Image: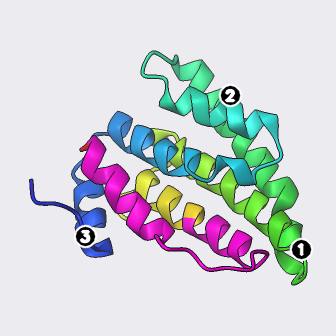
Amino acid sequence: MPAISNDHELRDALNRLAEARQRFIGATFTKNVIHLCKDGRVQRAVETALNPDASDAELQDAFKAAKSYAAKTYTACGKDTDWLAQADHFVAAAAAAALTPAAQVTERTNPAWRAAVQARMAQNCAMMEEDEGEIETEAQRQYRIANENL
């Protein structure tokens, strides 16, 4: 498989993955920004998503926890001055995306891709609080993660 170096290639590769691999890759993208999340339940949800032996009940509970925290922190996105609160929200949204149950996934929905985009949003919000830019973007880190795991 040729190396992934852009979003088109990443999305195509993610669309070819089975449900469990989409969850794993999406959770890996989320884990890359988990340090921006304040909630232990979301952090545990990501660990559950990364566990290949997690039961359906554990995955469902993890999804509910991440989705609940994302909903709770949604109002932070209306505050234009609290970038870290917004980053916190997007990490939870990325975790929820990665854990999206199969029954809620449509043909146009890819949990790993949605997790990737939400993780990028989290990192972009966090960058607003930093004095310096990044050498490697979150997208580039995701390409590397995908190349290492696919």
Which residue in the structure is indicated by mark 3?
A: 5
**Main secondary structure along the magenta-highlighted residues:** helix
Which residue in the structure is indicated by mark 2?
A: 61
Mark 1 vs 3, N-terminal side: 3
Tell me, yes or no, if residue 109 can be seen here: no
For the residues labelled 1 and 3, the Cα–Cα distance comes to: 32 Å
10 Å crowding of disc 3: few (<14), some (14-19), many (20+): some
**Circle 3 sits in a helix, a strand or a loop, which is it?**
loop
Disc 2 vs disc 1: which is toward the camera? Answer: 1
10 Å crowding of disc 1: few (<14), some (14-19), many (20+): some
Viewer-closest of 149 and 15: 149
For the residues labelled 2 and 1, the Cα–Cα distance comes to: 29 Å
Q: Residue 96: image x %, image y %? A: 62, 48
- The residue depicted at 44 percent of the width and 40 percent of the height is 23
**Circle 2 sits in a helix, a strand or a loop, which is it?**
helix
Q: Residue 33: image x %, image y %? A: 62, 53
Left or right for 38, reference 7:
right
To which quarter of the image does residue 85 belong?
Answer: bottom right
**Circle 1 sits in a helix, a strand or a loop, which is it?**
loop
Magenta span includes 29:
no
* Residue that lies at the very extreme toward the left in this rendered image: 1
Q: How is the image coloured?
A: rainbow
Q: Which residues are magenta?
A: 120-149
Q: Residue 62: image x %, image y %? A: 66, 32
To which quarter of the image does residue 11 belong?
Answer: bottom left
In the rendered image of this protein, does residue 80 appear above or below residue 88?
Answer: below
Q: Amino acid at mark 1?
A: Asp
10 Å crowding of disc 2: few (<14), some (14-19), many (20+): some
Which residue in the structure is indicated by mark 1?
A: 82
Q: Amino acid at mark 3?
A: Ser
Mark 2 vs 1, N-terminal side: 2
